[in-house]
Amino acid sequence: MNVGVIVFPGSNCDRDMFHVLSDVFHMTPQYCWHDKPLPENLDAVVLPGGFSYGDRLRAGVIAAHSPIIKDVKKMAEKGIPILGVCNGFQILVESGLLPGVLLKNDSLNFMCEWTNLTVENNKTPFTNQFELNEKIPIPIANGDGRYFVDDETLKQLERKNQIVFKYDQVVNGSSNQIAGVCNEDGNVVGMMPHPERAVESEINPHDNKPSSLIFESLLNNMGANN
Amino acid sequence: MGNYRVHVTIENKPGISDPEGKTILNDLVLKGTKQNVSNITTAKMLKFTITENNKESAQSKVKEICDELRIYNPMVSVVTIDTFDA
């Protein structure tokens, strides 16, 4: 499976993501620089975490105007699975591929800690191997992780089953404890926590299997399509 | 054509929490000597300098740039634009 890992100036989780995709899940990732066209042979695209453009103006907004995002939008329209993690989620939101916005955490702190997610939608290419309400111990590492949507959009997200992950307790002031959402078609998923930091038992003191299901879901999705 | 300074103030819509403003209020101002301050909100200001035919077109051009490039996020923010002769 060919997976594009998009690299922006200031991305810093791209190598972790590449390592996990290739060494743990035996996919074929390739780095894609932000000002080059996206290769057409990709089966999935990942926007990794980091601090693209130093979070200037607003986290993700400058990267959202990169040339490669036009190609990401075309792939999204074709139904190709796209995952944004942390800064990648912020970029997807700022590019209009996902609804909402990520604001500074209520505490104003950069939060680097383990959280627990619950799976709210197990129909996406990144969650199809989960049971509904399954728990995922997973770390966050962000300063601007407070997901916000207005009441009307929140109702719409609930109605259309676009809430993918929630924190199981109040973490940073996110609307309805939302940690990850998808687009209406379900193929574009954004999440603040870092699955690539949780899939190996050596660096996960809790349970690395639930986070692994995010990538196994992607493999399963591809298998089902091929 | 003339030069104009256009100030764009970006702030949260009413009702959206502003923890930075609250921290400045509760942990700085209200711990000082002035107890009659009831609210503080933070904002970001961008100062554009632009060459345009007149003040009105300077203002509308900057608004257009802000909308087109999502200089502010309309989900959460509002902008106020003030234009001055440079």
Image: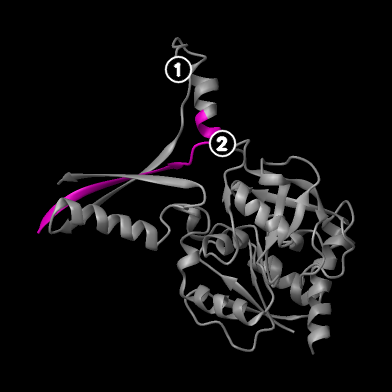
Q: How far across and down, in percent of the image, does residue B3 sit?
A: 14, 53
From where the camera sits, is residue A37 visible? yes
Q: How far across and down, in percent of the image, does residue A30 sit?
A: 64, 80
Residue A107: quarter of image: top right
Q: How many marks?
A: 2
From where the camera sits, is residue A148 visible? no
Residue placed at 52% from the left, 54% from the top?
Answer: A59
Q: Nearer the viewer, residue A46 or A70?
A: A70
Question: Chain under label 2?
Answer: B
According to the picture, the residue beneath numbered tag 2 turns out to be B17
Q: Are marks 2 and 1 in contact (CB under 8 Å)?
A: no
Looking at the rendering, in which quadrant would you find the C terminus of chain A? bottom right
Residue B16: quarter of image: top right
Q: How far across and down, in percent of the image, does residue A70 sit?
A: 50, 76
What is the span of residues highlighted in magenta in the rendered image?
B1-21
Q: Earlier in the sequence, mark 2 or mark 1?
A: 2
Q: Is residue A86 magenta-colored?
A: no
Going by the numbered disc 1, the residue's amino acid type is Val
Q: In this image, B47 relative to A45: left or right?
A: left
Q: Taking A67 as reference, is B16 above or below it?
A: above
Going by the numbered disc 2, the residue's amino acid type is Ser
Q: In this image, B79 relative to A11: left or right?
A: left
Q: In this image, A209 relative to A151: left or right?
A: right
**Mark linked to residue B37:** 1
Dot 2, how many residues are within 10 Å of its Cα: few (below 14), some (14-19), or many (20+)?
A: some
Q: How far across and down, in percent of the image, does residue A13 sit?
A: 65, 63
